[in-house]
Image (cartoon, coloured by chain):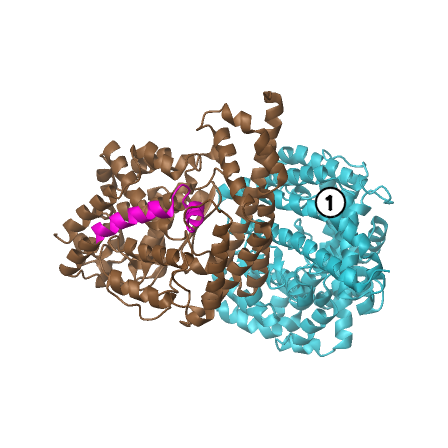
Chain colours: A brown, B cyan
């Protein structure tokens, strides 16, 4: 049995080793953010090299023999600590990350990282040119490397499991497929019923809206909703994203379109949701690997909560719509709140995931999830992917993309990452957001009337106290069960959708 | 004798080791740039830690035993290469950096780095409050650490030598003192004569000027002068600076004042000079330590060339003044070119270094240089520094600062760096800029008439070919001698000042 005097310095050493990794990650994230927002075009090639260097050094530190020894030495210390204590959680997470990193050779990570940068570069040019042939060889290599990555985890049941687990720890292919199958069964008839009902006219949202005024409205709204501009900032970029360099510096980007009010509003509220999560992590965890969102799904849940459950609700706009009208009097002066509310919740079979409404969104995800599974399992080649994509859009959503740019090349994920594990988090997030929101509303029924008055504290603080603050201390599965009292289910989401759209479309 | 087959991989290894250090430095520089330009206030504390981590890892790599071994193994290879070849220069510079870094313990560098961040933080608050007492203990520690640093180089003649050498390789306290003494002897009578002449009225430059229009004018001017916005950007910050993340991403900041046209114009032209240097380095050197300005003095020379020799010349404004007038017709419509030219060259005894004219500027530098020398040599305590500062301003410039904010706390250097070696580069730069410009004009007499037509290629390319492209292949001393055919002298500068201000003030 080791004494505390011996343990203390080892734990200190662990903490500072992990802090270095965190700092390298934060630096790489800033280089990435800068590349997307302010970097001049000439900077790209050196920037790729610089990010790769930081990632490589971080990976070396994540697999350093001294880290393994420290974790071994701290095993007994960890045993005596409460599961939910900061120290135990830190050691537990560090061990999980270490063991995962040790499975993958550094040379492979370097190859992957280099390939990802190249593939992304090619995609950014090929997509506007609708040139799938140009990215095909790169995507084939992505698939090859993704399969190789999965191969480093030989105990997995299914080839996609390690890739899913990496993004949504604890989830498997089988669990995801089960949830998705249940969900699809509910969504398809609902979608058919909605599409059969009267179509929604949202042309009022597609007039001309000054971009600076849109941005200013969004800024004021999210400041009221709880986003802390003293600890973050909002910039514009073609592909909105949130990134964090510390708990006190959480930034996001927005996409503003002059002819589509939805883009600016909902990309802002979505990314703000991600950002509230990171801003709400317990300051005690700063500088440790615990200071992060717990999984892709849980992160997405926070974004979808604020984007959909809150900012696509009627109550939210009872407070904000008069303000929006006063900014855009000419365009919205004669549009009633009800018409606006219907417009921002228009359900339609459309080709683009990020533009999809709450009813069809998860069908877009399922297509991607299943296609990547088929590719990983050798049932679908990259060559046949565009056709398979189009066929699935035809069969599941009843539309055929006009071209590959709108089809198989629309999302960046496969082109800058891996194939496998990239998409399930979106739907898991939708399910979690509904389940968590249901619990929040049960606990604090006043939340809905507060939204109507532009009051967000109760909701924000409930999420901060129950989810945000914990960072990575618990797994997503643990969090859902702790907070909602049961495991993840499709029921709250289905019930939320059924109520909201049943009312909207008088089903 | 080693064969090339054995050497090649070692040289490759050296190159990639050095590239990692370069990437870490670039990342730290970007974190720093972001902190100054776009970072939200909350980000500061984590940012300090992150930069320190990057610097620490870079320092570990700079002193890594494998680097020492590689440099040893490559000694014979280097011997057979021409001095000016890229490979020989790279090995030579890497060895110099390695040997210098090895003199200083990593723990000291970590302590220094931490202290510098704290001291800077305290200064930023203390300066606007005019509270020297608040920074005094920090400055005492800065002095203590600076002396310690110098102590790691026990072979130096004078305690300031290692600190001067670090910024201006090859220069010593004695050499600097000698140049400064000569220069002072020339400047003092000139200043007295100018001040005795009729005072200049530059009130026209202190009207109200729209900041966005100022910035836009500057952007267009420097694009014409040769700054490549595809490989850089210009932002605003209270303390203008230039920073480089690669040869193809060289950014600078400007300070725009609504009531002082000088600030925006000349901080832009000054920083652009620094930036042209870095943008002009041979692309072959990218990613190596050779891709950098050669010394503090040589870097400053490029800034002062474009700021003073070019953009404070009458010829330059023959082309640009009509454009500036058309932007600010109300303010400048009735101001003649001659009046404007006199205004931007107004000579005055003033308390702020960065606002000083070309005649008095070096007197500001000499005060700082001598005060830091006295502190390092134990002849002046930090406690007595404010009084010594004020006395020197009284005796050398004939003015007494109103308070410490305007006095001893005006420059950031001592508060974010070290004491010693921080200032001589400014005056060395002024001397070099005049000596180099004189040679350029002798070689291409058409440069002056080209400036009058807004043509900058001949001048820009001469500097690119003779200075910029070489990066750190030669030392500053070597460059001056190669290019001008003689060693650094005060004569060209004195002659430049005498001609220009003699004419302006009819002396």
The location of residue B417, given as percent across then percent down, is 68, 44
Q: Is residue B177 left or right of residue B337?
A: right
Query: A172 left or right of A180?
Result: right
Query: On the rendered image, what quadrant is the N terminus of chain B found in?
Result: bottom right
The residue to which callout 1 is attached is B394
In this rendering, position of residue B364 left or right of residue A229: right
User: Which class describes the residues within 10 Å of circle 1: few (<14), some (14-19), or many (20+)?
Assistant: some
State which quarter of the image contains the C terminus of chain B: bottom right
- In front here: A126 or A456? A126
Q: Which residue is drawn at the image coordinates 59% and 25% (left, top)? A: A7
The magenta stretch spans which residues? A159-187
The location of residue B420, given as percent across then percent down, is 75, 45
Q: Nearer the viewer, residue B193 or A395?
A: A395
Q: Nearer the viewer, residue A12 or A481?
A: A481
- Up/down of A59 relative to B384, above or below: below
Asked if residue B61 shows in the view, the reply is yes
Tag 1 subunit:
B
Dominant SS type (magenta): helix
Is residue A47 covered in magenta?
no
| Count of picture labels | 1
Residue A185 forms part of the magenta stretch: yes
Going by the image, does B257 lie left or right of B407? Answer: left
Q: Is residue B235 above or below residue B340?
A: above
Tell me the residue at 62%/78% (across/down).
B453
Furthest residue to the left? A506
- Whole-percent x and y of residue B135? 64, 35
């Amino acid at each position: 049995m080791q004494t505390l005097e011996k343990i203390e310095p080892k734990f200190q050493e662990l903490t500072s080793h992990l802090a270095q990794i965190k700092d390298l990650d934060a630096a790489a994230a800033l280089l990435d953010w800068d590349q997307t927002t302010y970097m001049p075009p000439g900077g790209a090639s050196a920037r790729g090299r610089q990010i790769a260097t930081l990632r490589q050094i971080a990976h070396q530190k994540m697999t350093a023999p001294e880290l393994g020894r420290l974790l071994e030495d701290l095993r007994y210390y960890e045993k005596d600590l409460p599961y939910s204590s900061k120290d135990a959680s830190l050691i537990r997470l560090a061990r999980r990350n270490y063991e995962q990193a040790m499975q993958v050779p550094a040379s492979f990570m370097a190859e992957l990282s280099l390939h990802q940068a190249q593939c992304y570069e090619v995609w950014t040019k090929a997509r506007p040119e609708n040139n799938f042939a140009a990215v095909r060889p790169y995507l084939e290599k992505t698939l090859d490397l993704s399969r190789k990555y999965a191969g480093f985890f030989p105990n997995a049941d299914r080839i996609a499991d390690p890739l899913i687990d990496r993004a949504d720890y604890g989830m498997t292919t089988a669990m995801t497929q089960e949830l998705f199958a249940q969900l699809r069964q509910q969504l398809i008839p609902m979608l058919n019923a909605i599409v059969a009902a009267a179509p929604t006219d949202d042309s009022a949202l597609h007039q001309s809206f000054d971009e600076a005024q849109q941005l200013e409205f969004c800024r004021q709204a999210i400041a009221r909703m709880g986003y802390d501009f003293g600890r973050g900032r909002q910039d514009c970029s073609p592909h909105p994203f949130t990134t964090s360099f510390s708990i006190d510096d959480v930034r996001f980007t927005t996409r503003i379109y002059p002819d589509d009010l939805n883009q600016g509003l909902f990309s802002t509220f979505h990314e703000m949701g991600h950002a509230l999560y990171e801003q709400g992590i317990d300051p005690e965890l700063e500088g440790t690997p615990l200071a992060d969102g717990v999984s892709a799904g849980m992160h997405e849940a926070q974004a979808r909560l604020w984007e959909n459950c809150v900012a696509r609700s009627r109550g939210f706009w009872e407070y904000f719509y008069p303000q929006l009208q006063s900014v855009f009097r000419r365009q919205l002066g004669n549009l009633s709140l009800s018409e606006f509310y219907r417009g921002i919740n228009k359900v339609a079979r459309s080709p683009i995931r990020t533009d999809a409404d709450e009813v069809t969104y998860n069908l877009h995800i399922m297509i991607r999830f299943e296609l990547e599974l088929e590719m990983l399992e050798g049932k679908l080649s990259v060559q046949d992917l565009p056709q398979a994509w189009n066929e699935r859009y035809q069969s599941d959503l009843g539309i055929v993309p006009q071209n590959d740019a709108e089809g198989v090349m629309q999302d960046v994920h496969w082109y800058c990452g891996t194939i496998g594990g990239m998409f399930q988090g979106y739907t898991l997030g939708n399910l979690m957001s509904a389940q968590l929101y249901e619990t929040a509303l049960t606990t604090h029924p006043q939340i809905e009337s507060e939204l109507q008055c532009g009051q967000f504290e109760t909701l924000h603080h409930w999420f901060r106290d129950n989810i945000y603050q914990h960072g990575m201390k618990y797994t997503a599965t643990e969090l859902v069960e702790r907070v909602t009292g049961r495991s993840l289910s499709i029921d709250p989401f289905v019930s939320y959708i059924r109520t909201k759209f049943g009312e909207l479309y008088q089903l």
